[in-house]
Image (cartoon, rainbow, N blue to C red):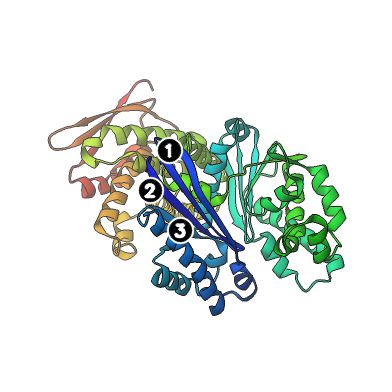
Amino acid sequence: MKNGIFAAINIGASAFRMHISEYVNGEERTLEYLIKPFRLGKDTFSKGYIALENVYLATDILRKFSQKLDEYNIRKHYKAVCTSGVREAVNRAFFIDHVRQETGIDLEIIEPADEIYIKYVGVKNDIAGFSQYEKDGVLIANISSGNVALAILKDEQNIYSGALPYGSLRLRRIFSDIPRISRYKAYEQYVMKMFHSMEGGMSKDTRLKHFISAGSSLNILLSIFRPVKNELKRSDLEKLYEKIKQMPRDTIMTSLNIRKDEASVLLPTLVTYLKLMDYAGTDTVKFTRQSFPHTLSLYYSGNIRDRGFVNRVRSTILGIGRRYNMDEKHAETTVRFSMKLFEKLRPLHSLGRREKLMLEAASILSDVGNYIGSRNHNKHSYYLVQSIEIPGLDRQFVKIVSYLALMHNGDVEHWFENKYNYFPMEKRLLIKKLVSILRVSDAMDASHMNLITDFDVDILQGKIVIRAKCKKTPFLEKLSFEEKGRIFMDTFGIPIELETRILYD
């Protein structure tokens, strides 16, 4: 919605927040921002569930938020999401159902990948010069009570993303029994473990230049330092850390004039910031003052966009392929052929840009399984692709790409009859259309020798003819085309043939 009033509600691990904005022709005016500190995650992180008493207290808070929806008459124009405090609770379904019954608010659990992506889009639209940061190498960290959501971008590709269980309140709960005088050492060791979790998914020689932060834990530091510019210096954080690392909580609270709940999590917050600054190799951290509910409001109302999304996804997928030592020349050829076929065959498949990007991703990643072993490499590719998380790409997109990687080789009909027969007809047809194009494109470089340089497509009355221009006689390509082209007839009801013309031999 470009015009009107929109509300965003965030059920966090340590507070409930509500942001209400009015949008007029793309211009925003904040009407109200409500925050109610409530440690819902305290139960989740220590017991694994939300105590019934806290379910009722949370519902009372949300009942007041519900009254605001009625006051502004925006029952159909809001988004309410839960993060780790609810997401990780075993009784999350009961909590969501109880809130809906008592308040009328429909809560949604936001998945870590979506949470990271929305926060990334918010930072991207709020930080000046961010496009240069993406090229240089930037670490984005949203440090909240429950999780540390991280995104690492360099050369305009997503190198790493993940929501890791190292939030400040969670750390405080995990080490609450450790003697205060040595608790800071436990925090340091635990946060260092976070970097080991990250290293498996990225190159060891990745170099960064910038560190950008957001999240609820940032608010404590802002209330203490009150920076004029949107940045914090390592020297100031280190000085505060040395001052309080063995200090009792009540002394921290009185000496810094902060709340008791803030004093409890200040030490793990400082540890996390300092270790992330070490990792990024920077002495300053830039930050956005934009709250997560504010970002949610801008994102779900359609008032911020991720410019350059497709190019970044494309670069990220190429980076993943290179990580698994793909045959880059073959991948480039398969992409070129599949994209051309997609365009030439539009009258048959009637698919759009999203499906074209799926096909492109599968053309790049279909052979990454060779990294594990050449035998049944398509099955290895399937499992590797299934594990991919790229902020902004939903799981359905990734799953379809994994099916295409699986079916680019082998007996497609066997998989549909024995494994995917429960798929709805629309999904089965979509996969078959894309895999038909992928298999034909892959077959035209079966030898990985780029013998076919280009081709024309003729859609005739009773068949489709691909007229290929070749460097040499493509024996393996012809053989593979006969095998892989059969699914095309089954899908579109028209045979496809390959004719070759040798340019020179």
Q: Kindly identify which residue carries mark 3.
A: 80
**SS label for mark 2:** loop
**Quarter that holds the N terminus:** top left
Counting residues from the N terminus, which is met first, the one under dot 1 or under dot 2? 2
* Front in this rendered view, residue 27 or 236: 27
Q: Kindly identify which residue carries mark 1.
A: 447
Q: Nearer the viewer, mark 3 or mark 1?
A: 3
C-alpha separation, residue under disc 3 versus residue under disc 1: 53 Å
Q: Kindly identify which residue carries mark 2.
A: 408
Residue at 27% from the left image edge and 60% from the top image edge: 424
* Front in this rendered view, residue 202 or 5: 5
C-alpha separation, residue under disc 2 versus residue under disc 3: 40 Å
Q: Name the amino acid type tagged 3.
A: Ala
Can residue 390 be seen? Answer: no
**SS label for mark 3:** strand
Going by the image, does 422 lie left or right of 137?
left
Query: Badge 1 local density, few (<14 within 10 Å), some, or many (20+)?
Result: some
Specify the farthest residue to the top: 504
Residue at 41% from the left image edge and 64% from the top image edge: 105
Q: Name the amino acid type tagged 2.
A: His
**SS label for mark 1:** loop
Going by the image, does 358 lie left or right of 59?
left
* Front in this rendered view, residue 130 or 397: 130
x, y (%) of residue 77?
38, 52
Q: Name the amino acid type tagged 1.
A: Ser
x, y (%) of residue 353?
34, 38
